[in-house]
Amino acid sequence: MKTQSEITFEKIKSLEIQGAMNVAKSALIAMAKDVINFPEENPEKFLEILSSARPNEPMLRNILRWFIKESKGLSGEVLLQDLANSILEEIEKGEKEIYSLGAELIHDGMKVFTHCHSSTTVGILKEAKNQGKKFVVFTTETRPRFQGRITAKELADSKIEVFHMVDSAAKYAIDGADIFIFGADSILPSGYLINKVGTGIFCVVAARYDVPTYCATHTLKIVTDRIDEAVEERDPKEVWEDAPPNVKIKNPAFDKVHLKYITAFITEKGLLKDIL
């Protein structure tokens, strides 16, 4: 019988669950269930399983360590579930604060560019829409797994005008954009952030065209247990399933982006120029 951590590991690894915020929340729910169902097990076991699914997700690690620390001395399903719920409520409160703060940056007539799928960025744009602001969003496909299509669909479902394009056409969206907003998977003490592959080159292009660049992120995504992180390499078959045997495929899932490219960070603690 698989533990909830093992089941959630598989869903995160396959990208059935994606987005740093969604991954972290799902991992917390899984760990809480396993700590309740397997009280004899060391919670660190579940932390190890879940964190190995996405090495570039410090929010996942930070939240699970938060739960482990606060759960010491607690026993019983009700108390442990209440703890997990209180952590989730605190995170969701922070999300709403980010949505509200980010929406202040969106104005009528704006051309917004975003890349990949960030539930935080989508939340900001939905909040701006709810405030009655009229703007247009340009999104990229985010090959090879097309997570950008998720963003485009969610925005369209919210009646936000959205244009979708292949990644290599992003120049047409960035040139003339009023703002570039994206999420983050991690913020590194070394002075870089990690986000979906493509983010780095788009930040360079945005700088070339003087487009303000904002990273919408919870401060729980700051790495506290190491200086740097390796970029995850995913299965080459995602890029070219039947590639000729003499063609070597590179499939980095993320980019490291120097923090100098970020105008400011939209966080639950406010608009921060320096997040570290």
Image: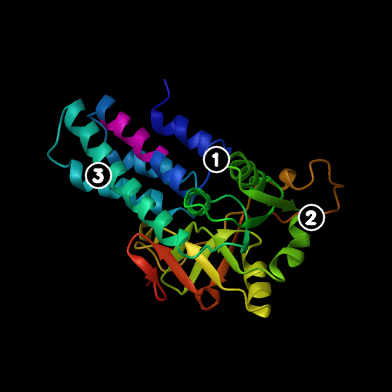
Magenta stretch, residue numbers: 26-35
Residue 79 locus on image (x, y percent)? 17, 32
Identify residue for label 2: 248
Residue 145 locus on image (x, y percent)? 68, 45
What type of secondary structure mainly makes up the magenta span? helix
* Vertical arrangement, residue 205 with respect to residue 22, above or below: below
Q: Residue at x 42, y 20 (%)?
A: 1
Label at residue 68 = 3
Q: Is residue 42 visible?
A: no
Looking at the image, what colour scheme do you see? rainbow
What is the distance, in whole Å, between disc 3 and disc 1 at their CAs? Answer: 23 Å
Q: Is residue 231 visible?
A: yes
Counting every numbered tag in the picture gives 3
What is the distance, in whole Å, between disc 2 and disc 3 at their CAs? Answer: 42 Å
CB contact under 8 Å: marks 2 and 3 = no
Residue 165 locus on image (x, y percent)? 75, 53
As drawn, is 142 to the left or to the right of 255? right
